[in-house]
Amino acid sequence: MNSEPHSASYHGIDFVDTKEYKRFVEFTEACMEYRYIGICYGEPGVGKSFAAEHYLNWDDQIVVSSFVEHLPSTIIEKVENCRGVLMIAPVVNSPKIVQDRIKRGIEGFGVARDRMRGETNIVTLIYDAPKLCPLVVVDEADRLDIKSLEQLRGIQPIKCIFLSSGHLITFGKNITHYGSVGRNVQSSKAMA
C-alpha cells in the first residue's frame, strides 16, 4: 500500500488524502457497517464538509425528480461514483423541511441508482429507492433541534453521519439526551 497521500482535484480545489481523511473514511465505513449514527465534530475550517463531499462524491444533480425521465450519461456516471446523500441543514429549519430534503435526496438517489440498473417499473422504483441509499451525511447538524433529529431517525433505513462545527458537548447534549436518537451514537473529532 502506498503511504503517500493521494491528491485529487475536487470542484477546482485540490484535495489531498491525509491521515485525518483516512480516519474519516474508517469512521464512516464503521458507522455504515454497524448502523451507528456518527457525529464528526471539530472547529470550523478543519475540512469536515470537504472530506464528506470528497468521500460521498455527491452532486445535487443526481436527485431524479421524475420516475419516467431519461437519465443522461453524465448523471449515470455521477450515480455510479456516488456513495450517499449530502444534506446541508438549513439555517431556519423545521422537522418537515428536514424530512422533505432528506427524503428527496434519498429517494432521488435511489431512483437514479435503480434506473441506472435498468429498472422501469414505477412500483419497484418507489419501493426500492429508499433502500438503495447507503449513507446520509448531514452537514451543519448543530443547526438541528431535537424534533428535526427525531424526524431523521424516523426515516428508515438510514445510516447517518452528522457534521458539526460546534463542540460535541453542545450538539451531543441534543442527541444523547433523547434516548431513541441517542443510542448507537459514535463520535470522532476532526483535527486540522
Image (cartoon, helix red, strand yellow):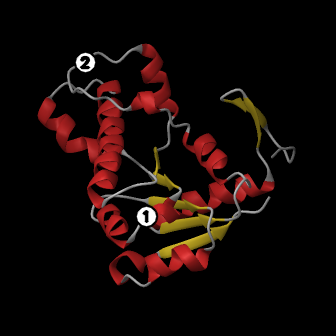
In the image, is residue 98 above or below residue 176? above
Residue 95 seen in the figure:
yes
Residue 155 seen in the figure:
no
- Identity, as a three-letter code, of the amino acid under mark 2: Glu
Tell which circle, 1 or 2, labels the residue nearer the N-terminal end.
2
In the image, is residue 18 above or below residue 69? below
On the rendered image, what quadrant is the C terminus found in?
A: bottom right
Q: Which residue is mark 1?
A: 144
On residue 118, the disc is none
Give how far across and how far down residue 81 sits, in percent.
Answer: 52, 32
Left-right relation of 17 to 121 = right
Give how far across and how far down residue 50 sits, in percent.
Answer: 65, 45
Which residue: 49% across, 27% down? 78
Which residue: 64% across, 54% down? 25
Q: Please tell me how crowded label 1 is: few (under 14), some (14-19), or many (20+) other residues with Cα within 10 Å.
A: many
Q: Which of labels 1 and 2 is toward the front? A: 1
Picture quadrant where residue 27 is located: bottom right
Picture quadrant where residue 69 is located: top left
Which residue: 36% across, 58% down? 158
Q: Secondary structure at mark 2?
A: loop
Left-right relation of 185 to 65 = right
CA separation in Å, label 1 and label 2: 33 Å
Give how far across and how far down residue 53 sits, in percent.
Answer: 59, 42
In the image, is residue 59 above or below residue 88? above
Q: Which residue is mark 2?
A: 69
Q: Secondary structure at mark 1?
A: loop
